Amino acid sequence: MTAVDGRHLPGARGRREPLLDVGQLTVAAGIGHGRRVLVQDVVLRIGRGETLGIVGESGSGKSVTARALVRLLPPGLTASGQVTFQGLSLIDAPERDMRRIRGSRISLLLQDPFTMLNPLQVIYTHLAESLHPDVQRTRPRARAEVARRLEEVGLAPDVMSRYPFQLSGGMRQRAALAAALSRDPELLIADEPTTALDVTTQDEVLRLLRQVQRQRGMALILITHDLRLAYSVCDTIQVMYAGAVVERAAAQELSRQPLHPYSLGLALAALPVSHYVEQIRSIPGQMAAADATSPTCPFADRCAWAEDQCVEQRPPLRKIGPTRWSACIRTGEIADDLQADLARMTGPVRPRPTTLAAGGPVVVVQGLRKTYRTSSLLGARREIVATDGVSLQVASGESVGLVGETGSGKTTIARSILGLTRPDAGRIHIAGIDASDYRKLTRRERRTVQGCVQVVFQDPYASLNPALSIGATLSEALRFRAAGGPEQTVGELLDSVALPAAFAARRPAALSGGERQRIAIARALARRPRLLICDEPVASLDVSAQAQILELLRKMRQEIRMSMLFITHDLSVVRQMTDRIIILYHGKIVEEGATPTVLDNPAHAYTQRLLAAAGHE
């Protein structure tokens, strides 16, 4: 295989020496015959003030690469190759040197701030312990410096006295960013820093990252599975697949014309907010392990343009233009086809098909109110109004979107309908039965209500029993199917969600996130519900897995004429999945109407703010 010389990567000519220069970085697990390659021959370079995006699905090697750069690989993994930071080789540097570099010169910001923040320490302690020793010695000076650091990330000084669990997700991520920046690093590696956040908080954190980067002249490596987000933030993007870089280009060039089939697949799987698409595109199949594809093109099994020559050898990352690199040996032959596929996605928009409700309401919610009472460690009590007089209904055959930020009341409404939360006031009718308080239902009424409404949660692993096989889980669900409903086997249920019958013998841990979510959907559909509640069902999945799940839900809804209550903060998902939309803000409905009407002509300022944030402008 032809080696890639980092000196000839985009932008290298005539430029100052890079801050970080990486060549032929390989990460492996085990030794000898049991050695498995996880990341192979990765090359990257980044200068001061630049932003490099590393994009790919889960399992592509993005996070392993990031950890290898700062020698924070888990036990059993080893890295080889060249990693040079301002002339210092990090691959073989003594650990005492690495301890001086981590945090002070190179810092990590992780996806889940809880992994960075000690739940037993207040925010002040997290930041103060990273300050220069001269500042730490004087408490008033240390508090003033911590307050300044918090202010830099948009947090009030009183946040320093709080524990991580007392902060919202966005505030925790800001606090984690302040901690990551407390030693004034020259390079920040941000690993999926906004994935778990709602749309407005994502936008705030991204704006904050760019602002801090400009003010400090800091380099930023952004790791994400969202190609659209990378376009808006990064100068240069490297696309990784099965442990290898398959394309590298300036962000704007890549957005206009991806030159590797995998990059195009990621672009086509990203849902538009602006219009409805007739078919949600996804990349077929699953990513293979890096070592399983070493003699061939790693993407060949999933590529519509693959030919015999693609599996004869592993294509190297090669230069195909002044600032373009691709690991596809057919780039010159298929470039026009790739461009035509992209153009079809961004071409003239067809009108959305009109969907009319087929009958009366399946669920009716009237004046729903729920208040939660909490206590702090100091004994202070406070009340949080989750829903404040919410009224809504979902008609037979209709798909309704519930949209709002974290804390807007979306999940409280869903839990109240499911009987998992008892409202303080209001009424809930399901299939004509008063289900405001499940404790008052007769056994027959409870069975009817629970058969009428099923749910798919955000985290499929948490909702599946890890000790049970998939077959046992689905068999249990089939035992409770509605009387008179169609007879189904486990194999037929798996086939309905496009999974082979052999999956019945597996356990949840052996499946990917998208496969587990398909099992959760199959279990919910086993009872042939009239209403399926989807609570952020794709929020934790890669864009391709998201596309697969959403297209599956569309198909199942049409086949069994099922109503849906779709809870999400993602407006692109709402556009594709719902007929009508309800916007929630601080527990109240602020706007509702037909999905195209609300998204194309938002009347409320909050809806306008959500749409502005969705563009990552």
Image (tube, rainbow, N blue to C red):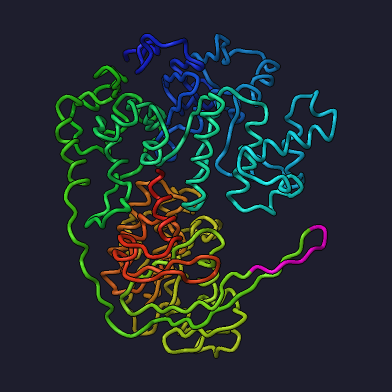
Image quadrant in which the C terminus is located: top left
Q: Position of residue 58 (x, y in %)?
A: 44, 40
Q: Position of residue 266 (x, y in %)?
A: 32, 41
Say if the magenta span includes residue 381: yes
**Residue at left 43%, top 56%?**
610
Does residue 173 appear in this view?
yes
Q: Which residues are magenta?
A: 377-384
Image quadrant in which the N terminus is located: top left
Say if the magenta span includes residue 471: no
Compare residues 471 and 594 and report the one nearer the observer: 594
247 left or right, relative to 17 = left
Q: Position of residue 2 (x, y in %)?
A: 32, 13
227 left or right, relative to 416 = left
Compare residues 30 and 539 and report the one nearer the observer: 539
**Residue at left 35%, top 25%?**
294
Does residue 471 appear in this view?
no
Q: Is residue 332 above or below residue 157?
A: above
Compare residues 67 and 44 and report the one nearer the observer: 44
